[in-house]
Structures are given as C-alpha cells and as structure tokens.
Image: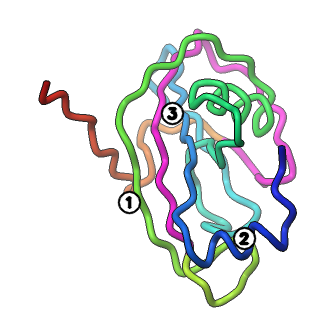
Amino acid sequence: MIIPIEYYKKIVEVLPILCVDVIIKNGEGEYLLIKRANEPLKGQWWVIGGRVLKGESLEQAAKRKVKEEVGLEIDNVQSMGYYEDSLETNPFCSAIPLHSISIVFSTIIENKKMVTLDHQSSDWKYSKELPTDYFIKPFHNNL
C-alpha cells in the first residue's frame, strides 16, 4: 500500500524511513549503479533501493525495488548490514531533513544484463566501485 503524499510528508518530519538497498554485482566484479533523477541524492550515482511497504518483508521489498527501478528479476539476496543517513534534502524539496535506515542486501547476476530504468533514475552503469560515501555497517552476532 502506498502512503498518500500528505501523510508521507508528516511521517518524514518525525520518523526515520525504513528502506532497503540492493547491491547488484556482475560476474566481472562490477556494481550496478543508477543515477538518481529526484531527491534525495539527485544527480548522484547510487545503489538501487527505496522504502519498505507495510506488510512486505525486507527481502520482498529488495526484489520489488530491483524489478521497479531496473527491470531485473533477482532470486537470491543476502543481507549484508545496514546503511543510515541523514540528508538535508527529501523527496518533497522542503527544508525538513530526511533520516533513513536501509537494510542492505546483495545479489550476483551472471553477466552485464541490460536494464530498463523507471522514472526515478536518469542513467545506469556498471562500476568497479560503490559510491564513496556509502558505508555499510555490518550486523553483529553477539549471541
């Protein structure tokens, strides 16, 4: 279920947003990156990802975001850790900072598959490096 925009604006004002990020690597060790067409991070190369919807598991959200954003079907995803950010910009271009927490997944595709971008991205590429300010914090198992 998609949140009506007026409610989502209010949520962004008071709560962190739960997201998933998906790091896709090909057989040559390159990462699939998209160039964001909207805020936050407009114009920057980034990994695929976005909000988790109510009633959706994290793994389902990861698979959905990949299908929506680049048109790829992925089967095997592994959780890697999390990425947390507080950005000065938000999807509404208002003065309210965006606090997001992303559970990071990874998957491997066999070759350089062609992608089909949705409206959220202006370009795509394979890169040997992830964005320099993308710091994944691993989960710790202290049991």
Q: On the rendered image, what quadrant is the N terminus found in?
A: top right
N-terminal-most mark, 2 or 3: 3
N-terminal-most mark, 2 or 1: 2
Q: Residue at x 55, y 34 (%)?
A: 22
Choose top left, top right, bottom left or bottom right for residue 9: bottom right
Amino acid marked by disc 1: Asp
Give the CA separation, mark 2 to mark 1.
Answer: 20 Å
Amino acid marked by disc 3: Ile
Q: Is residue 106 magenta?
A: yes
**Magenta stretch, residue numbers:** 98-124
Q: Is residue 8 left or right of residue 59?
A: right
Q: Residues within 10 Å of mark 3 (few under 14, many from 20)?
A: many
Q: Is residue 135 above or below residue 26?
A: below
Front in this rendered view, residue 117 or 91: 91
Q: Residue at x 61, y 78 (%)?
A: 13
Which structural element holds mark 1?
Answer: loop
Choose top left, top right, bottom left or bottom right for residue 96: bottom right
Horizontal and vertical percent for residue 24?
54, 28
Q: Is residue 25 left or right of residue 44?
A: left
The colour scheme is rainbow
Q: Are marks 2 and 1 in contact (CB under 8 Å)?
A: no
Find disc 1 in the rendering and name its residue. 133
Q: Is residue 41 left or right of residue 134?
A: right
Which numbered tag is attached to residue 23? Answer: 3
Find disc 2 in the rendering and name its residue. 91
Amino acid marked by disc 2: Pro
Q: Is residue 130 left or right of residue 60?
A: left
